[in-house]
Amino acid sequence: MAAYQAAAGALAAGLRRVPGYGNTDLTTLALPAPTPETLGNGHALTVHMAALAALLTRLTEPTGGVERSQRPEEVILAHERRYWDRVADHRQLGLESLRLSVVSTALLSGAATRAEATATLALLPGLRGDAAEDHRRKLAAWIRDLYPPDIQSGEYWGTLHPDRLTEYHLTRTLSDDVEPLLLSTVLPHLSESQATRALTVLTRALALPTAPADLADQLQDLITRHPTALGVPAVRVVPQAQEPAPLMAALLTICQNVELPIGLCHELYDAIPWQSQRLMEHALALSRRQAAHYERALGTRRRRPSKQSPDARNLIKGKLATALVNQSRQLSRLGRCEESLTAINHAVKIRRKLKQAHRNLSLLDLAGALNDQSNRLAQLGRLDESLRAITHAVEIYEELARTHPEHLHSSLAGALNNLSNRLADVGRIEDALTAITRAVEIHESADWDHDSSDAILADRAMTLSNQSNHLASLGRREEALEAITHAAEIREQLTETRPDAFLPDLATALNNKSNQLFSLGRADEALQAISQSVDTYEALLPTRREAFMPQLAAALNNKSVALNRLGRKSEALTAVNKAVEVYELLTESRPGIFSKDHAGALNNQANRLADLGCFAEALTVITRAVEHYEELTRNRPEAFLPDHAAALTNQAHELARVGQWEEAKSVMARAIRKLEVLAARNPRAFASRLADARLTQRQFQTAWPRSQACPTMSPGAPVP
């Protein structure tokens, strides 16, 4: 109520400066108390509009107030319509029957120039043809008088403020009994910038309770029937739209049309924002359409040889390879890794053949394809092949960067970033840190300050995030936290403007930041960061279940660790139980790929069970984790030796707790042998763990108190 009264006072003082309202001291008017329905949820705009509506109503009806059934927008627009007529009458405009359509069209589309304004009005019945040119000019000038443009906008027409009034006005105008054909008359014939503005306004209008019931269907139908005029504007609007469903449905129909012209196919694909979540299926459909088109073109030329030069045929092959790279990326983002690898393998094969014809140009394209191929192989757990592919890509980029450093530093930094990840995958952490440090140095030294594009910022954040991971693996926690904090700040900045594209990356950064905070003993801050990460992944899960399930499971596992450190043991077990459940599903559908993460979650689950006194169940779970690690270590000992040693240590503790002393000593001896190897390689990271293990082994030589085990429970079950 205080905000309402303050808004009413400020608006009353402002209205006295408006022509026609200066004769009354509006600040002395007693306004009726607003109803809860009028104030809505207390949003500042709603409160201000309610206060303005009450003031305007009291001016025209001194004893009345805004009726409960009358929305503030309706009251304000009624006064706005009288304003339109006053200005029109003052200009002796006439044309009463056209005024509503003209205002609605101007508010919907806007116009950058006088010529565009009159051309837009020429779309309306009654204003077409040369005979109506004078009417169009007068009406265009009338709109400009009503709503002068901001000086810096560069527009010919301004607009009605706040935006909600425009949206409300259009929902009323587009209803069946007012201007039902306005959209079909105007929208398909606007310029690209006008159509983008119109679709933005209309998607916001869809969220209003006054929106016509068929408005969404109208939009979907118009976009589907006019893909050349409305396809690209719809793509530009979708990522930020409050109600994107009709636009997305129309675009999917367009993108899946096998007869879509290849030129428009490329225009639509190029317009899709980088990393857009909402338009991934659309991007996949377009890349498939492109690949199919160029495959057919090559097949036709094979069947009907022509005089076309080899260069022309190679050009088509290059376009096919680019389409396959794009297809592979979209499939990967959708979690369809096997299909993604098939597409990128085909692209690499084409690029290798083209290299023989155009070495320097094709080398660059081959390096990019190898970079993508490495990522796809890594997603499927084929780590040795992945490392070979990215190593080759880096060698190519380094060769090319020696002659064209200004153009290739960014690509080389990206490849080094991926190389560092692949080296870490096979346990070469020091080499991984060396590679990622080179990537960071390239980002810091290159003159990219003038280029603050989303892609450049995202690359910097990814590089810093990976550097943080490798620093942490080598025990350099403070440096790791500094790097991931910087990465999270960049991703927060990107998410503010494009949440559709960068929210998943922010969730990943928060997960990693939580790990580093936790390792430094800052458990409260760690829990705050990881809780935000979990919430984000759970919100994203319905959009891309296969893609976000692994990240959600990892975040839940980390949240469990933070909760446990803060003494919230039951909550910690609940979180890790959820993580294990997700990993069980993932390992069933894609065995081998998530074995490491599954084993880590089982290790954590065993610790949480032991914290609650469930020692027998903890032993069962940790034994499962050890079995996973033994299989992983057989295939790749360097990569999994640290985790295997940690799991063996935990298994020894659980054996001792249930009184199996000989087994506990035997398992701890195995853990010590592995830790001795690790400590010899990296004493900073493993010397203290080795000392702890040796101390525990000595304690096993004496009596160890046996604790009561709780009843057996299946993994993932809640604690009673």
Image: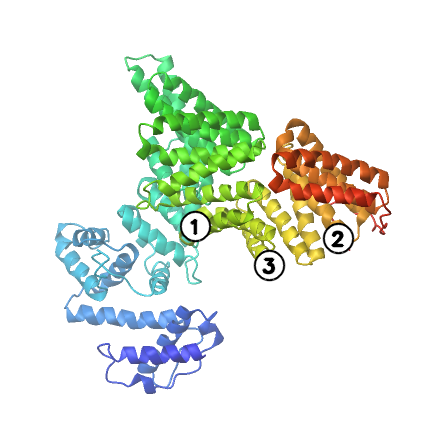
x, y (%) of residue 10? 33, 78
Q: Amino acid at mark 3?
A: Asp
Q: Amino acid at mark 2?
A: Asp
> Which residue in the protein does label 2 denote?
611
Instruction: Specify how the rendered protein is coloured.
Output: rainbow
**Marked residue nearer the N-terminal end (2 or 1):** 1
Q: Nearer the viewer, residue 692 or 259?
A: 692
Residue name at image x 59 percent, y 33 percent:
427
- Relative placement, left or right, of 326 versus 79 is right
- Density class for disc 3 (Cα within 10 Å; few <14, some 14-19, many ≥20) is some
> Which residue in the protein does label 1 denote?
490
- Relative placement, left or right, of 660 versus 687 is right
What kind of element bears circle 3? helix
The C terminus sits in image quarter: bottom right
Residue 524 tag number: 3
**Marked residue nearer the N-terminal end (2 or 3):** 3
Q: Is residue 619 visible?
A: no
| Cα–Cα gap, marks 3 and 1 | 23 Å
The N terminus sits in image quarter: bottom left
